[in-house]
Amino acid sequence: MQRLAKKWRRAGEDIGLVPTMGYLHEGHLSLARAARKRVGKRGRVVVSIYVNPTQFAPTEDFSKYPRDLKRDLKLLRECGVDVVFTPKDAEMYPDRSAVPTGFSTYVIEENLSQRMEGASRPAHFRGVTTVVAKLFNIVRPDVAVFGQKDFQQAAIIQRMVRDLDFPVRIIVAPTVREADGLAMSSRNKYLEDDLRRQATVLRRAIDMARAAVKKSRKISAAELKANVEKIIESVPDARLDYVEFFDPETLVPVTEVSGGVQMALAVFVGKTRLIDNERL
Ligand code: PAJ
């Protein structure tokens, strides 16, 4: 992949990268299209598919994370992607558990990673920044596209690029949703009939907050959080992990919510953990 990227660069072709963990849906494909738009017809679009073990906790769904490479490749071919990069664990993390010879260097963002997803999933963002830094060094993209769906992840990657001088432009593309408002996610596959219906509660919570802000202009975050909790609790198999209202640039929580504040929440629906967010 590095050799190929070097060849493309020499020929003056711009490179766009879309990192994914596969089991692709329209959200991922919209990122590939955004990358194509950026690099043009003569540029190169690379989509990586790699279920990155270092961003999963031992208790999480790494081994049962959905995978279907054949289907993914077909979708990406139809989408006009040039290369699908599918590295193996042994290539990405040589001898990860071997001491002292194995993989032992990580990239850690220390500020934006503390709250929300970082608080609920310790070491998650360390795995994300590490694998994305590796992908940047392997693919050497001019632009890389990430989804707004993972708002905190996109903010952390932008910070990493700024702090460590990666020569790449980050584009954040809008969240693609199902017809009923559920944000597309590979993990939606885990939701069977009734749970799938219950999963619309995230969208309903966001809509409620949005309507409340629109109506009263300014409303206390504590009050909004209590209302979100009520909505989530009214759904039999849903359990609120967190809901936050914060400044979209700094991710610092606000006490008063008004227009322009970012809302993010994580909810367990059955055993499946779903996230969503939106600018109010
Ligand atoms: P994954 O969950 O496969 O998502 C890959 C990219 O697709 C991310 O940038 C994510 O924000 C974006 N995405 C997911 N659902 C989306 C939706 N409904 N609309 C728009 N974009 C969406 O995020 C990861 O993988 C990993 O953490 C990764 C960055 C690949 C590092 O391992």
Image: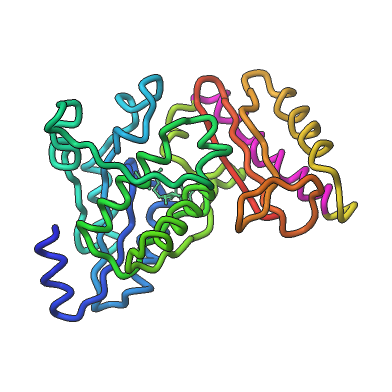
Q: Which quadrant holds residue 201?
A: top right
Q: What residue do we see at 21% from left, 63% from top?
A: 82
- Is 65 drawn above or below residue 111 in the view shown? above
The residue sitting at the right extreme is: 216
Which region is colored magenta?
A: 192-213
Q: Which quadrant would the C terminus be assigned to in this image?
A: bottom right
Colour scheme of the rendered structure: rainbow
Q: Which quadrant would the N terminus be assigned to in this image?
A: bottom left
Residue 80: x %, y % from top left: 26, 64
Q: What residue do we see at 76% from left, 50% from top?
A: 210
Residue 131 is left or right of residue 103, and the answer is right
Residue 210 is a magenta residue: yes
Residue 70 is a magenta residue: no
Residue 109: x %, y % from top left: 44, 47
Name the residue nearer the viewer: 254 or 223: 254
The residue sitting at the bottom extreme is: 12
Residue 85 is left or right of residue 210, and the answer is left
Q: Main secondary structure of the magenta part?
A: helix
Q: Which quadrant holds residue 258?
A: bottom right
The residue sitting at the front extreme is: 100
Name the residue nearer the viewer: 180 or 123: 123
Residue 38 is left or right of residue 135, and the answer is right
Residue 252: x %, y % from top left: 65, 48
Q: What residue do we see at 33% from left, 57% from top?
A: 18
